[in-house]
């Protein structure tokens, strides 16, 4: 504990010497180059054109790093102090490689532009603090180079990802989102909303007891969610179908299944039976119309066909539950 208290904290950029500023710039360029290569690796399978963009950006960072090393050797010698971004207060952090695989292509592009903008601001600040003319010129040139990366990403994008290719990559990203999240989630929501109607309303009208009805609805919803989640995750590993991570699909399906059933089970926490049932029926129709909307919006199912399939089918299941409960 005492060793932690005595450990020095992060330093401010203003407290660094010119040699330490150069060392920080060298390590930062190395980090950014590695990150761009990680972006390229993550994108190469589905987005080969964008992967090439990030490979060239990594090459550019490597060139900057060598210029900085040469300047350090000329000014301070071969021994470069170990100064990394995590040692400096308020210096922009970078995400570790293992988080990159979960980022969308649009998010990766945004991160790259943010990295270049942060590097631009750093070099401007560093150039203003050095008294050596050659070092000041180098840092100023690098600031301009990083600023132009506001465009290197765009310049290289024009070369490697022309409009038609970018549109194709964006469509691939959209299709992957639909396959991994929307399709399993929609299937879960439909199953949870429709399959639990009969047991919940049968229990409601058979017992006239809101608490017992809620317990039936809770158990049916949670059980269906677990079943759908495991089924979705286990029946397809996503490698051949291209549907993405089985864990993500299983979670999307399981969570939406449980929510679909809980929507019309929760009103039975209200002690008044008629009030709880009225609210539950209203929730059911909202759920069914929401499913029809999602089918139309994301799966491109004609709206009236979606309404006919979902609302009519759900209404029949609801009616069956009420009839069985009154029998």
Image (cartoon, rainbow, N blue to C red):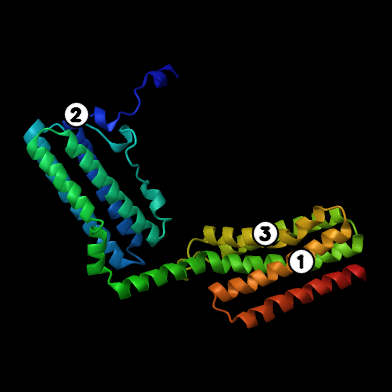
**Mark 2, residue position:** 17
Position of 164 compared to 210: left or right? left
**Mark 3, residue position:** 259
* Label 3 – label 1 distance at C-alpha: 16 Å
Closer mark to the observer between disc 2 and disc 3: 2
Q: Residues within 10 Å of mark 3 (few under 14, many from 20)?
A: some
Question: Quadrant where the C terminus lies?
Answer: bottom right
Image coords of residue 27 (percent x, y): 23, 40
- Residue at image point 36% right, 70% down: 169
Tag 2's secondary structure?
loop
- Residue at image point 78% right, 77% down: 316
For residue 213, the mark is none
Position of 94 compared to 262: left or right? left
Q: Quadrant of residue 302 in the image?
A: bottom right
Image coords of residue 73 (percent x, y): 9, 36
- The numbered mark, 2 or 3, whose residue comes first in the sequence reads 2
Tag 1's secondary structure?
helix
- The numbered mark, 3 or 1, whose residue comes first in the sequence reads 3
For residue 282, the mark is 1
Marks 3 and 1 in Cβ contact (< 8 Å): no
Marks 1 and 2 in Cβ contact (< 8 Å): no
- The numbered mark, 1 or 2, whose residue comes first in the sequence reads 2
Q: Residues within 10 Å of mark 2 (few under 14, many from 20)?
A: few
Q: Is residue 111 above or below residue 289?
A: above
* Label 1 – label 2 distance at C-alpha: 68 Å
Tag 3's secondary structure?
helix
């Amino acid at each position: 504990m005492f060793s932690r208290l005595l450990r020095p904290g992060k330093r401010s950029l203003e407290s660094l010497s010119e040699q330490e500023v150069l060392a920080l710039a060298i390590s930062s360029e190395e980090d950014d180059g590695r990150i761009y290569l990680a972006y390229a690796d993550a994108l190469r399978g589905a987005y080969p054109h964008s992967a090439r963009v990030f490979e060239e950006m990594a090459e550019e960072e490597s060139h900057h790093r060598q210029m900085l090393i040469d300047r350090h050797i000329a000014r301070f010698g071969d021994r470069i102090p170990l100064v990394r971004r995590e040692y400096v207060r308020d210096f922009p952090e970078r995400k570790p490689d293992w988080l990159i695989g979960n980022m969308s292509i649009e998010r990766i592009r945004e991160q790259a532009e943010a990295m270049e903008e942060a590097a631009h601001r750093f070099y401007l600040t560093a150039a203003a603090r050095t008294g050596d003319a050659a070092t000041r010129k180098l840092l100023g040139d690098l600031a301009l180079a990083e600023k132009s990366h506001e465009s290197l990403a765009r310049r290289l994008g024009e070369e490697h990802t022309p409009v038609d290719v970018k549109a194709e990559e964006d469509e691939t990203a959209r299709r992957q989102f639909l396959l991994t999240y929307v399709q399993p989630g929609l299937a879960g929501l439909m199953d949870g909303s429709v399959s639990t109607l009969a047991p919940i309303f049968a229990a409601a009208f058979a017992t006239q007891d809101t608490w017992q009805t809620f317990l039936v609805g809770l158990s049916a919803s949670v059980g269906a969610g677990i079943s759908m989640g495991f089924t979705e995750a286990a029946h397809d590993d996503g490698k051949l179908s291209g549907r993405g991570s089985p864990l993500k699909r299983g979670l999307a399906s399981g969570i939406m299944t449980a929510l679909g059933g809980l929507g019309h089970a929760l009103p039975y926490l209200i002690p008044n039976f008629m009030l709880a049932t009225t609210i539950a029926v209203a929730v059911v129709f909202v759920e069914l119309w929401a499913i029809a909307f999602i089918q139309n919006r994301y799966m491109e199912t004609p709206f009236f066909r979606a309404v006919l399939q979902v609302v009519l089918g759900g209404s029949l299941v609801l009616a069956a539950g009420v009839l069985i409960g009154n029998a």
